[in-house]
Amino acid sequence: MWGIVRQNVGGASGLSSQVMRLRPVASAMRNYSSATKEMTVRDALNSALDEEMAADPNVFVMGEEVGEYQGAYKITKGLLDKYGPERVVDTPITEAGFAGIGVGSAYHGLRPVIEFMTFNFSMQAIDHVINSAAKSNYMSAGQINVPIVFRGPNGPAAGVGAQHSQCYGAWYGSVPGLKVLVPYSSEDARGLLKAAIRDPDPVVFLENELLYGESFPVSAEVLDSSFCLPIGKAKIEREGKDITITAFSKMVGYALKAAEILEKDGINAEVINLRSIRPLDRATINASVRKTNRLVTVEEGFPQHGIGAEICASVVEDSFGYLDAPVERVAGADVPTPYAANLERMAFPQIEDIVRAAKRACYRAVPMAATA
Amino acid sequence: MGLARAIQPLPLPPLADSRPKPTATASSLFLGSTRTLRPSNTFARTHTRTRSISSAQRRSAVAANVSDVKLKPATNLLLTKEEALEVYEDMILGRVFEDMCAQMYYRGKMFGFVHLYNGQEAVSSGFIKLLKKEDSVVSTYRDHVHALSKGVPARAVMSELFGKTTGCCRGQGGSMHMFSSEYNVLGGFAFIGEGIPVATGAAFTSKYKREVLKEADCDHVTLAFFGDGTANNGQFFECLNMAALWKLPIIFVVENNLWAIGMSHLRATSDPEIWKKGPAFGMPGVHVDGMDVLKVREVAQEAIGRARRGEGPTLVECETYRFRGHSLADPDELRDPGDEKARYAARDPITQFKKHLIESKLANEAELKAIEKKIEEVVEEAVEFADASPAPSRSQLLENVFADPRGFGIGPDGRYRCEDPKFTEGTAQV
């Protein structure tokens, strides 16, 4: 079968009722009677890159294995044949070098899309992401802007070990001059990548390897070649009135499933897909908390100085009087990622952790420390 | 002296052939490459130097007198009178400006990290005066004179150093971050090695414009200036590789002043001859006396010509010296084994060039004095201008973080989203 579970969450209105994917569909694009197509995140990114490269000859892709290998995760599949090796540039293993080359070319008005095989490798180039890309418009007082996109998978995959599993949302999200985007669904992927490529500022585009193969329905509007989403605005994936759950990237899927489980216990959860870590959509989050009075933040990264910490501080500053319970942060464990499958499972938030945190915030459970 | 002896790791290899071999690649294999390097014999011909390294000289941290062999007076070879005076004026501007910076710093008008270029003017004037306005220059923190040579007005640079809003970066960059989109000065970077990939990217753009965007006459070249310390950094090698691999129009100019703050080049480098690193990556490597602006200019002409013709990058090592410390905060105590400073001071590029101009009758005393006077006036006027300029207003603090005013990106209609009257805060719908 399709492998889709289509849900109408009780009380939620049309557009914001989220359709959940449980298993990736065999074929990415299908026509249903309701005329929405399915698209994997991989195809969404690929089509976005394709369309933007076709529309603007200044856009080019650079990175390891993006050309002849068709992309380490096949995101850039087919682009080399279409656009040639001058625009889809395979590089040697030189993150600092080619990130800097991207920045230098962006200084002169080209629009590079620099792929890091994973964002862990961006640490070798972080000087360029931050010092020569993010800060340049400010240091040059507006003379030189840097319309560059750094994209690649971020956060944990499955069993890849400590050096391949870190989430960089918090690190890049703290730097003024960068925009940091975190898509979840195919619609997010397409819209945000197009917005990022068209944007005149440096954008860090944090994808997720495990989401690449997942299918989501996309409307005709999403498939249009001028579709792009606003940067800095979150999306309410599921409306609710009892508790707000914020998440980004893969955790949005987990949060939605947690919301279903909570629904059975009579807790009506509102799930916010952040879409953008910088600028962070404080308005949406605060409005939601003022409505529900309780907040759980979910992220896969390390807990200290993480995204949840920033959201909590923002809510405490702006909506303190509206909080009925302390803000719960669900984050990865404060350890480098272990390899063993059971340990890895414990090192990252699972659906049950989100459910438990939500119940704690609703005073339906006894407060507990992290699971042993 | 004992110290000097201890810091010399290896005796400098006596060169059996007194000429450097800048294009060793002519005879070496290009594994896997289908390109052949056209051996450029002009390098070998004009840079004869006798490297008689006596043990006494070896004890000091510097190679022996490189300019033993004088180039014959180059009136008909290199410079017309106008060009000569232009170069002289540029070198004087660099020197007077930097001296004024020191004065202003000690008077408290300038602050933070200020790195002065005294003694290295031949490199900047020798190279940058050959460039067009569209060519790019990328530098390190020792960038005042590179910006001046490229054409940024002295008053804009001085105001920037004073932190005033009339500076070339409105006071937001400072001494180490000189940017000018008009004159294509792409920084000004504090981290050494950071400018090299950026410069390689600017060269990449030049090639991209020619090949992909079909701007057929785009032959802009990029110069990357950096020091001997940077030549040990990983990014440098990454960029040598990629520049040679893709034949980018870039010239890597090493200003080898033998010291990285207090770290002698010989203590830090396994093979101190930096020009040799070029052929290892498939590009010519040239060593030139960086205290002689004529020699620098000749090498620069060849290298820039190569890049413009699409023949790829060149690595040029300029042996030079900084007369002052690393920065104005550096007490500069480590740097005088033997009488190194005195010997280099005797080779002051400006004095040398002035002498040459007068001897070869390209100019007379009076003209040169007039230039010096003019430059002093320019620099003093720059100081007055900077003094009189206002400090940035408070509202300037939050400006220019993004090119896009509010950070919400560009909408499908191509305009800033925040300017769309229908755009509101709140949850995003598709």
Image (cartoon, coloured by chain):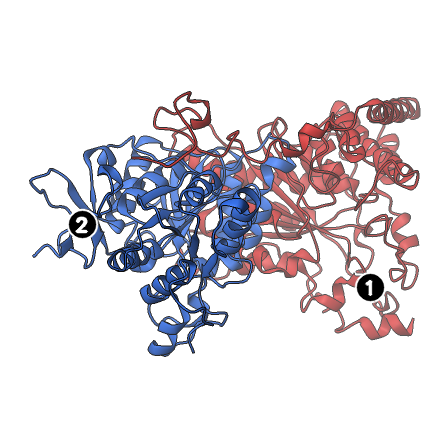
Chain colours: A blue, B red
**Residue B54 locus on image (x, y percent):** 84, 67
Q: Residue at x 64, y 56 (%)?
A: B275
- Pick the residue in front: A9 or A161: A9
**Residue B406 locus on image (x, y percent):** 51, 31
Residue B194 as seen in the image, left or right of residue B106:
left
Which amino acid lies under the numbered mark 2 shown in the image of this protein?
Gln
- Residue occupied by mark 2: A7
- Pick the residue in front: A349 or A91: A349
Q: Residue at x 44, y 57 (%)?
A: A119
Quadrant assignment, res B259:
bottom right
Residue A63 in sight from this viewpoint: no
Quadrant assignment, res B332:
bottom right
Estimate the spatial distance between the alpha carbons at disc 1 and disc 2, rounded to whole Å: 77 Å
Looking at the rendered structure, the secondary structure element under dot 2 is loop
Residue B196 as seen in the image, left or right of residue B46:
left
- Of the 4 image quadrants, the one containing the C terminus of chain B is top left
Quadrant assignment, res B58:
bottom right
- Pick the residue in front: B110 or A267: A267
In the displayed structure, would residue B419 be above or below residue A341? above
- Residue occupied by mark 1: B61
**Residue B297 locus on image (x, y percent):** 70, 38
Q: Please, which chain is the residue tagged with disc 1 on?
A: B
| Mark linked to residue B329 | none
Task: Same chain for labels 1 and 2? Say yes or no.
Answer: no
